[in-house]
Image (spheres, rainbow, N blue to C red):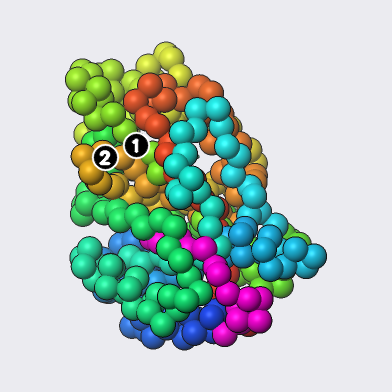
């Protein structure tokens, strides 16, 4: 993924969004076009998605209507965010079966727009092949990640992801969603020094098969669950990353209303998550992902 500042005028925005949409349509032809299904990307080649961030609206549409949740993400006392890894006007998300394919696609999307888009943050990530039994991948901690997610094709998936008329949103967000992403560095030396039973108690699931453990003290899973209000979960599609010797999780959650579905969980985890001793949050963004970019 890559985030950008926008340095053009308001009048140039529709032309830029049209060009990006046309390019994305070409790239996604022949795929499912759904970034939310990283598995599909691995099978079908390349998937690209464009999102719009708070800076685009605060700088150019101050008096108009914005998507409702661009400021949904709370910052917490534990955050150690690098300024370039926060915010932005535009995000380009590309998933592909090889890193070179995704980087080349990112370049292709930016090309021709260099005078309007200045890159803030480029973050690569990877997803190991999913475990064949449970269909999800292991994260850098070695845990199966994504087990509690809503499943494609089920009602919960539809209801948790896509903005509907009930959401009272700008019309072009109907059928769209929001991305909340956090770059979370993990102290793997400290983590790997723990006995397996302790790791499992902190996560709240067995390492081998993801079965929920009851350790008698709060685990990551229990604390996350305790802060999920109402029937709508978020869809977590996190990637692992490794750069400059640091490793961690590029946590990515999709939801139709991140203020309700994601923010409370993040706040609660920042206070009580037993994994906090091993992690530092160093990046945080929220972007609106319309089904098609507004013209
Ligand atoms: C380094 C950071 C993190 C790691 C390693 C991690 C890992 C995991 C793992 C292994 C699970 C259990 C398997 C599963 O259901 O996917 C899980 C569950 C979950 N995590 Fe995280 N997570 C991290 C950060 C976060 C953050 C920042 C949030 C929210 C803002 C979050 C929200 C959740 C939720 C909602 C669940 C499902 C709970 C349930 O219903 O069982 N996680 N996480």
Badge 1 marks a residue whose secondary structure is strand
Q: Quadrant of the N terminus?
A: bottom left
Q: Position of residue 78 (x, y in %)?
A: 50, 28
Circles 2 and 1: CB distance less than 8 Å?
yes
Where does label 2 land, which residue?
247
State how many labels appear. Answer: 2
User: Could you tell me residue 26's position as x and y percent?
Assistant: 39, 85
Question: Left of 132 or right of it: where is 118?
Answer: right
Residue position marked by numbered label 1 in the rendering = 185
Q: Residues within 10 Å of mark 1 (few under 14, many from 20)?
A: many
Q: Residue 228: tell me if it is visible.
A: no
Which label sits on residue 25?
A: none
Which residue of the protein is positioned furthest toward the top in this rendering?
216
Residue shown at 44% from the left, 58% from the top: 120
Quadrant holding the C terminus: bottom right
**Label 1 CB-ligand 1 distance < 8 A:** no
Q: Is 22 drawn above or below residue 250 in the view shown?
A: below
Secondary-structure class at tag 2: strand
Q: Which residue is found at the position 48% from the left and 45% from the top?
A: 83
Q: Is residue 172 visible?
A: yes
Q: On the rendered structure, is 37 left or right of 199?
A: right
**Which sits in the foreground, 66 or 132?**
66
Span highlighted in magenta in the image: 1-15
Residue visible at 34% across and 61% down? Answer: 38
At horizontal 47% and vertical 39% (from top left) the residue drawn is 81
- As drawn, is 176 to the left or to the right of 183? right
In the rendered image, residue 92, in percent from the top left (x then y), is placed at 43, 67
Report which quarter residue 175 is drawn in. Answer: bottom right
For residue 225, above or below residue 217: below
């Amino acid at each position: 993924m890559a985030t950008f500042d926008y340095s053009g005028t308001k009048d140039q925005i529709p032309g830029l969004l049209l060009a990006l949409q046309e390019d994305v349509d070409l790239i996604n032809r022949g795929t499912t076009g759904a970034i939310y299904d990283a598995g599909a990307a691995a099978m079908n080649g390349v998937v690209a998605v464009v999102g719009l961030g708070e800076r685009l609206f605060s700088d150019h549409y101050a008096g108009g209507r914005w998507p409702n949740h661009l400021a949904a993400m709370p910052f917490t006392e534990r955050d150690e965010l690098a300024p370039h890894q926060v915010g932005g006007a535009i995000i380009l998300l590309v998933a592909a079966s090889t890193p070179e394919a995704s980087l080349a696609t990112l370049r292709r999307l930016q090309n021709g727009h260099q005078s309007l888009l200045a890159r803030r943050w480029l973050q690569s990530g990877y997803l190991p092949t999913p475990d064949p039994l449970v269909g999800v991948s292991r994260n850098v901690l070695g845990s199966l990640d994504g087990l509690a997610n809503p499943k494609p094709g089920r009602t919960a998936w539809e209801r948790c992801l896509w903005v509907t008329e009930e959401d009272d949103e700008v019309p072009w967000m109907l059928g769209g969603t929001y991305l909340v992403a956090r770059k979370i560095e993990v102290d793997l030396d400290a983590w790997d020094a723990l006995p397996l039973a302790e790791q499992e108690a902190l996560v709240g699931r067995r390492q081998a098969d993801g079965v929920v453990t009851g350790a008698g003290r709060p685990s990551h899973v229990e604390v996350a669950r305790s802060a999920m209000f109402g029937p709508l979960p978020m869809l977590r599609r996190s990637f692992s990353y490794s750069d400059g010797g640091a490793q961690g999780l590029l946590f990515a959650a999709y939801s139709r209303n991140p203020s309700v579905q994601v923010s409370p969980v993040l706040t609660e985890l920042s206070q009580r998550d037993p994994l906090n001793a091993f992690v530092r949050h160093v990046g945080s963004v929220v972007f609106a992902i319309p089904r098609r970019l507004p013209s």
